[in-house]
Image: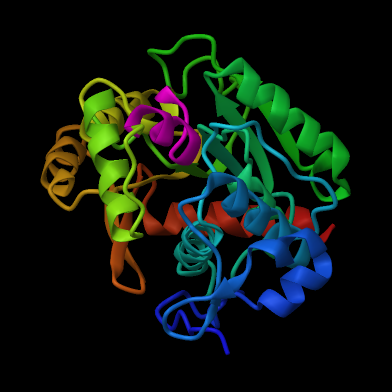
Amino acid sequence: MHKKKSQLHCRNKHQDGYDFAKLINILPELSHYVNRNPYGNLSIDFADPMVVKMLNKALLFSYYQMSYWDIPDGYLCPPIPGRADYIHYLADLLAQDNQNHVPTGRQIHVLDIGVGANVIYPIIGCAEYGWSFVGSDINPVAIKVALLITQANTLLKNTLQCRLQKDSGSIFKHIIKPNEFYTLTVCNPPFHASAEDALVSTQTKLNKLGKLTNSTQKTVLNFGGQHAELWCEGGESAFISNMINESTQYKTQCLWFTSLVSKKETLSIINKKLKQVAVVESRIIPMAQGQKVSRFVAWTFFNQTERQQLLSKSHRKTKR
């Protein structure tokens, strides 16, 4: 028996929870870390970063056509069901301007801001819909690892490009080239405003998991990710506001700009900023995973007719 994650997107492969028998069959060493939890269900210790990484590897091998995947210790190891939801809801966003059909194939170009070492969004987007990706990151090690994963997997070899952002103050600048057009941008921004905020947040997560620790700093680095993955000055509201400002310089080069938004209180700041730059349309799209409610913001400088025409053009190219 595995607990059903009933609030995940209807196309999410993880709606029924983790099939540990299947995962252990794919990655036998996972068996050493699977035990019955107090409810009698098979589970793992989600506070142990090495075990979580092993779970992710098994999921990516089982469901997303990966044959090699590994990240260095201390780099963000994201929960795959939630990341898959973002991709599926983005597919729905595009379908609304495409006669309710999800556009598939490599002509759907996606820019992943902060692709990280884990390249999770390109993996899911390529496996589920055949989209192509450019992934950017300010961390040279993350880009190096992302390139290793890309070259080691047939799925990604010709569908993912990795680009180092050398200017930590820029988001799209230096990454979007003059003649490029993207259907979507995706981003999991640094949510916290400081290292201290990140420490408190991770400690809270561990407390909920029943894992108290005296080495909070070490725990954050091992469990939560690198500095740039966790926090930036001003937190997610400042980061997304900067992203909105910068998007005005690339308004004709992207159909939909999007970003995850962790904190509900950030939404009022984002909505104010979107009005300031006069976007044509914006949406806040909720995503629920169990008791956790997440969301992403999407904005565009194209009207619906223009969006339909652009998607139709992409579809014709794919069919040739």
Q: Is residue 164 left or right of residue 62?
A: left
Range of residues picked out in magenta? 216-227
Residue 29 position within the rendered picture, expressed as x and y whole percent measured from the top left: 78, 59
Nearer to me, 136 or 247: 136
Which quadrant of the rendered structure holds the C terminus?
Answer: bottom right
Nearer to me, 133 or 103: 133
**Residue located farthest toward the front when viewing the structure as drawn:** 214
Q: Is residue 52 above or below residue 191?
A: below
Residue drawn at x 35%, y 74% is 290
Numbered label tally: 0
Q: Is residue 318 above or below residue 115?
A: below
- Residue 289 in which image quadrant: bottom left
Q: Is residue 64 left or right of residue 74?
A: right
Residue drawn at x 54%, y 45% is 49
Res 236 seen here: no
Whether the magenta-drawn stretch holds residue 300 is answered as no
Q: Main secondary structure of the magenta part?
A: helix
- Residue 135 in which image quadrant: top right
Residue 209 position within the rendered picture, expressed as x and y whole percent measured from the top left: 35, 60
Which quadrant of the rendered structure holds the N terminus?
Answer: bottom right
**Residue located farthest toward the bottom when viewing the structure as drawn:** 1
Residue drawn at x 61%, y 74% is 13
Q: Is residue 226 left or right of residue 14?
A: left
Q: Is residue 272 above or below residue 64?
A: above
- Residue 176 in which image quadrant: top right
